[in-house]
Image: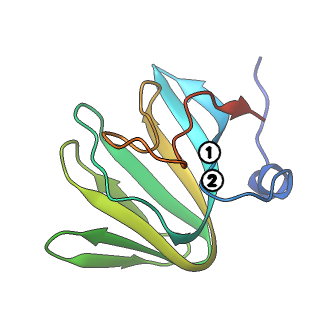
């Protein structure tokens, strides 16, 4: 089905953090929306690159050797095998674009791991 997606409406439909929702699919990739607040877990993805687009707020992406700050309208691609940890001091709305096989916590199992994602 062809239809537009309103990001504000979709972000307004949930309030929890670190729990991605699928809002679209193309070519084996998922478009996901997620709200960040606080630190996530250090992790890496063996086979998948990830795109993080900040829709609202600010995001800090920590790497073992540096930190990158992202503001609204900025994105970052984290290549496969690169260990990283997203951190948001205040609520941050993020659009993720990544292969459908991507597990949110990558190589790490934690209470934040989400194996089944809701479609909204």
Query: Between 65 and 99, which is closer to the camera in this rendering?
Result: 65
- Name the residue located 85 percent from the left edge and 57 percent from the top edge: 12
Up-down: is 45 above or below 51? above
In the picture, which quadrant includes the N terminus? Answer: top right
Q: Which residue is mark 1?
A: 20
- Residue 44 at what x, y percent from top left? 27, 47
- Numbered disc 2: secondary structure: strand
Query: Between 38 and 71, which is closer to the camera in this rendering?
Result: 38
In the picture, which quadrant includes the C terminus? Answer: top right
Mark 1 and mark 2 in contact (Cβ < 8 Å)? yes
- Name the residue located 22 percent from the left edge and 35 percent from the top edge: 46
- Numbered disc 1: secondary structure: loop
Query: Between 102 and 39, which is closer to the camera in this rendering?
Result: 39
- Residue 31 at what x, y percent from top left? 57, 38
- Name the residue located 62 percent from the left edge and 45 percent from the top edge: 20
Q: Residue 115 falls in which quadrant of the image?
A: top right
- Residue 112 at what x, y percent from top left? 54, 49
Q: Residues within 10 Å of mark 1 (few under 14, many from 20)?
A: many
């Amino acid at each position: 089905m062809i239809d537009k997606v309103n990001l504000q409406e979709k972000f307004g439909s949930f309030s929890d953090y670190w729990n991605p929702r699928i809002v679209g699919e193309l070519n084996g990739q998922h478009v996901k929306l997620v709200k960040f607040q606080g630190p996530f877990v250090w992790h890496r993805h063996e086979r998948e690159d990830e795109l993080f687009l900040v829709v609202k707020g600010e995001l800090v992406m920590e790497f073992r050797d540096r930190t990158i700050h992202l503001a609204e309208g900025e994105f970052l691609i984290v290549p496969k095998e690169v260990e990283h940890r997203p951190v948001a001091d205040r609520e941050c709305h993020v659009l993720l674009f990544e292969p459908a096989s991507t597990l949110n916590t990558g190589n790490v199992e934690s209470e934040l791991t989400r194996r089944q994602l809701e479609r909204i």
